[in-house]
Image (tube, helix red, strand yellow):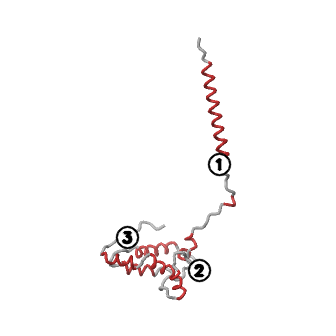
Amino acid sequence: MFDYQAGEKYKLTLIMVGFAGLMAGMFFTLLLMPSPEPQGAHHRQQPKWASDPDVTGGRGGMRSPGVSPLAQAAVRDGNAPAGGGGAPATLDPQSVTTMMNGWLDLAWDMSAGSAANSQQKAIQFMTPACALAYQSNVWTPDIAKPIQESGLKSPFTKTAIT
């Protein structure tokens, strides 16, 4: 009366079509996938800050991109502010952390009464080129004047130095 085998044929056909589709999908995926990079060609470029003399402690050329030509000329002529000095060859992590704790408190002090004095103390930690760049780009008279005239007190809380 009824042919139960007909449903089995359709089920087997659907399974075979699904399997063929899966195989075709894998084939095209492998065909279109980019080839892997050779082992020797994978060179990671060093970040720009890794060669900065303020980070390394060395005295490289005065061609820092953040320093204006006017500031570079002032450093060459000896008109740079005092401070900075050469860093030792090896640095103790504890002493660096202690120095950064003190410097961050000074550099981020934006209270009206003490900001100018704190900024001058923070600049003493910097190399001459960094100090000139800081004074011409960060702590400019245009920034200092509104802070001093505001009369506000601004707390700075550091949470971690890593």
Local packing at callout 3 (Cα closer than 10 Å; few below 14, some 14-19, many 20+) is some
**Spatial CA span between label 2 and label 1:** 45 Å
Residue drawn at the location 65% of the way across and 41% of the way down: 26
How many numbered marks does the figure carry? 3
Q: Estimate the x, y position of residue 141 in percent, counting from the top left.
A: 39, 80
Q: Which residue is mark 2?
A: 61
Q: Which residue is mark 1?
A: 33
Disc on the earlier residue, 2 or 3: 2
- Number of the front mark, 3 or 1: 1
- Tell me residue 85's x, y (percent): 52, 83
Question: Which class describes the residues within 10 Å of circle 2: few (<14), some (14-19), or many (20+)?
Answer: few
Q: Which circle's residue, 2 or 1, is located before the other in the chain?
A: 1
At label 1, the amino acid type is: Met
Q: Compared with residue 160, is residue 36 higher up or lower down, i.e. above or below?
A: above
Q: Residue 6, percent across and down?
A: 62, 19
Q: The N terminus is located in which quarter?
A: top right
Q: Secondary structure at mark 3?
A: loop
Q: Is residue 113 left or right of residue 33?
A: left
User: Closer to us: mark 2 or mark 3?
Assistant: 2
* Amino acid type of the residue that numbered disc 2 sits on in the rendered structure: Gly
The one of 99 and 148 positioned closer to us in this rendering = 148
Name the one closer to the observer, 76 or 157. 76
Do the residues under discs 3 and 1 have CB atoms within 8 angstroms?
no
Q: Quadrant of residue 138?
A: bottom left
Q: Give the CA distance from mark 3 to mark 1.
A: 51 Å
Q: Earlier in the sequence, mark 3 or mark 1?
A: 1
Q: Residue 105 occupies which quadrant of the picture?
A: bottom left
**Residue 58 sits in quarter:** bottom right
**Secondary-structure class at tag 2:** loop
Q: Which residue is mark 3?
A: 156
